[in-house]
Amino acid sequence: MQGIVPLLVVLPLVVAFGIVILVQVRVLRGLPVILACFAMLANLIVSLCLLGVQVDPIFVGGWGPAKTLGIQLTCDGMAKLMLVTINLVAFASVLFATSYIRRFTKPWLFYSLFLLMTGAMNAVVLAGDLFNLFVFLEVAAIASYALVAFGCESEELEASFKYLVLGSVGSVFILMGVAILYSLTGHLNMAMVHEALRALREAGPVGPAVLLAAAALIAGLALKAAMVPFHAWLPDAHPSAPAPISAMLSGVLIKASGVYALARIVFSVLGAQSEYAVILISLGAASMVIGALLSIGQWDFKRLLAYSSISQVGYVVLAIGVAAHVVSGPEPNRAAAGLCLFGGLFHLFNHAAFKSLLFLSSGSIEQQSGTRMLKEMGGLTRRMPVTSFCCRIGAMSIAGVPPFNGFFSKLIIVVALAMAGYVWLSALAVAVAVVTLLIFVKVQRYVLEGEPGPKVAAAREAPAMMCVGLVILAVVCVASGLAMVFLREQLFDPASSALLDTAKTITMGATP
């Protein structure tokens, strides 16, 4: 199994550049869509095959004693969870795009950029060294800048430019943090930097340089994750992008480039220290509340979904921050920390499914009706039954209605926060869940029920392949809630252990 891990990066990148060559041959111009779907399906199958299999670190171009130095690919439990999440959403999105993207010029360019972004995200979660983490963060970001502007209208270009500027600021902070850690430790490999920082902590108080590096990394990655107050780019980028890209941005990109990288840096590189944990808790709580409040007054369907993404990702970062704070205390409570991580990572996976489903549903509705405004919709249950049914499942999932997946992950987070001693944060999470429920009651009332507006009177069901993409994600929203125990054993416990086991080498003084 170890030999197939690089395929997750190599296959989409090769197909992405191969598409650019193939379209130069007239008789082969129909192949890009087939190749893109094949590459995403192959990546999903490889990701699933890796579950439950022990995969040792891979050293690309290894040199030195026993060839244990090189560009490291790490496929631990956390990486496997992210690989399944990324490639599942990517497969559903590319199926949806086969019909949706026909209304744009140069569909082949869309597929090439899409594969480039997906391959780079896979590389981000597999990267075992800080520099390659940064490099592939940038590759994914550059592809996403172009995809946000793919429609080439003024709205798309403005949103893409704002995203480019703020994304570049975040990249500068990340590179600065990596450079400082390299100057302090002489290493870029995450495990080696981790060990060097542990030695520095054992020798005495940590100097300001480590704190500066941590601040730069957390700030840069918080901007990539669109955490409050670094969220200004997201409400414009998500609505402006084509629906499959909105699904990828909200479903996986802000998680791979932001949340995953934050968790990996805080636990596996810096060590789960209380000062970093407090920052994550503050960012998570602020994003959870402010994102929900900002989404209440939105009448543009995709903008409402964009603001709610900030709120839902806040749940994940809050749970991860509390886990880091609990495990860094004088009496580390691994059980409470593990439950917090289980809830946070479960919600990360669930949010990828139901938010991607909602963004694809909004794209289907916009294409068939010609509007994104809630007040201009209505009565779509009768006109677009498949899309409406899937949209309703996504809305109930994000609102936390049982037995859908969002209910279970939110409940676990609430219980875990209370178990860890953060009762007020637990109450805050419940309050935000109630606000989210009200928001998506409004969505169902104005989009699916009532009398249709004049713009949607002639709306018809979306093409078959768009419906297939929706149905896949709708099934995941239902099945992941019902199969929570199985998923915990196969996905979430190994991911939690991957973070906690590396964190304790610094916080508890254990050896790896």
Image: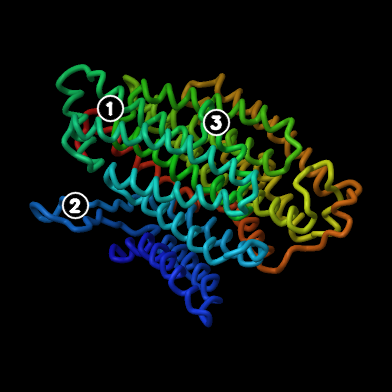
* Dot 2: element: strand
Mark 1 / mark 3, whichever is N-terminal = 3
First-in-chain label (1 vs 2): 2
Q: Is residue 203 above or below residue 399?
A: above
Instruction: Tell me the distance, in whole angstroms, between the alpha carbons under discs 1 and 3.
Output: 24 Å
Residue 110 image position (x, y, % from top left): 54, 61
Give above or below for 4 relative to 31: above
Where is residue 21 drawn, in percent x and y? 43, 72
Residue type of the residue flagged with mark 1: Thr
Graded by Cα atoms within 10 Å as few (under 14), some (14 to 19) or many (20 or more), the crowding at tag 3 reads some
Can you identify the residue that label 3 sits on?
Answer: 415
Of residue 336 and residue 252, the one placed in the foreground of this image is 252
Q: Is residue 498 left or right of residue 38?
A: left
First along the sequence among labels 2 and 3: 2
Question: Which residue occupies 23% across, 35% down?
Answer: 194
Mark 3: amino acid:
Val
Using the rendered image of the protein, determine whether residue 77 is visible from the camera's viewpoint.
no
Tell me if label 2 and label 3 are in contact, CB under 8 Å. no
Q: Secondary structure at mark 1?
A: helix
| Separation of residues labelled 1 and 2 (CA atoms) | 27 Å
Q: In the rendered view, does 40 fall on the left or right side of 136?
A: right
Secondary structure beneath dot 3 equals helix
Name the mark nearer the viewer: 1 or 3.
1
- Say if 140 sits above or below 7 in the image: above
Residue marked by disc 2? 70
At label 2, the amino acid type is Gly
- Checking the image for residue 507, the label placed there is 1
Q: Nearer the viewer, mark 2 or mark 3?
A: 2
For the residues labelled 1 and 2, say whether their Cβ atoms are less than 8 Å apart. Answer: no
Residue 488: x and y in percent read 47, 48
